[in-house]
Amino acid sequence: MAETLLKSTTRHIRLFTARVENGDLVPDPEQLTLDLDPDNEFLWTEGTVTTIQTRFRDLVESYAGQPLNDYNLRRIGTELEGSIRELLQAGSLTYNPDCRVMNYSMGLPRTPELL
């Protein structure tokens, strides 16, 4: 029986029960893979990526021993979306002006002129 790939997709977070091998996702029920901002809506710095990756690791660790199911994947994805919003509101993360669609999905940018 082939292993089933579970996934959870939010606007800026994609989670997969898989590992990456040669650029392909290979189902792995013991591993969770994060795809961050696949549409490049934001301009990421090394620091902001590290913040999200650290939060991701912390969340995965907090779910240790619990089933890796759709519900728990959605909870992790939702928490990460909240972390992205916090970075944006703090001014640590900015929208990418070259994004194919500028829709301000996390709210209007917070700049000194707008505060």
Image: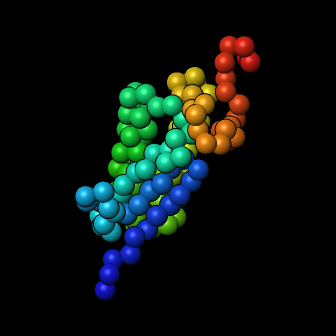
Which residue ends up furthest to the right in the rendered image? Answer: 114
Give 101 or 50, whichever is nearer the viewer.
101
Expressed as whole percent of the image width and height from the top left, the position of residue 23 reads: 30, 57
The number of callouts visible is 0
Which residue ends up furthest to the top in the rendered image? Answer: 112
Q: As drawn, is 114 to the left or to the right of 33?
A: right
Identified at 66% across, 18% down, the residue is: 111
Answer whether residue 86 is visible to the viewer in this image: no
Expressed as whole percent of the image width and height from the top left, the position of residue 47 reads: 40, 27
- Quadrant position of residue 109: top right
Identified at 40% across, 51% down, the residue is: 34
For residue 25, above or below residue 62: below
Q: Quadrant of the C terminus?
A: top right
Expressed as whole percent of the image width and height from the top left, the position of residue 37 reads: 50, 44
Answer whether residue 50 is visible to the viewer in this image: yes
Expressed as whole percent of the image width and height from the top left, the position of residue 106 reads: 65, 38
Q: As drawn, is 98 to the left or to the right of 47?
A: right
For residue 52, above or below residue 111: below
Identified at 36% across, 55% down, the residue is: 33
Which residue ends up furthest to the bottom in the rendered image? Answer: 1
Identified at 25% across, 58% down, the residue is: 22
- Quadrant position of residue 29: bottom left
Q: Quadrant of the N terminus?
A: bottom left
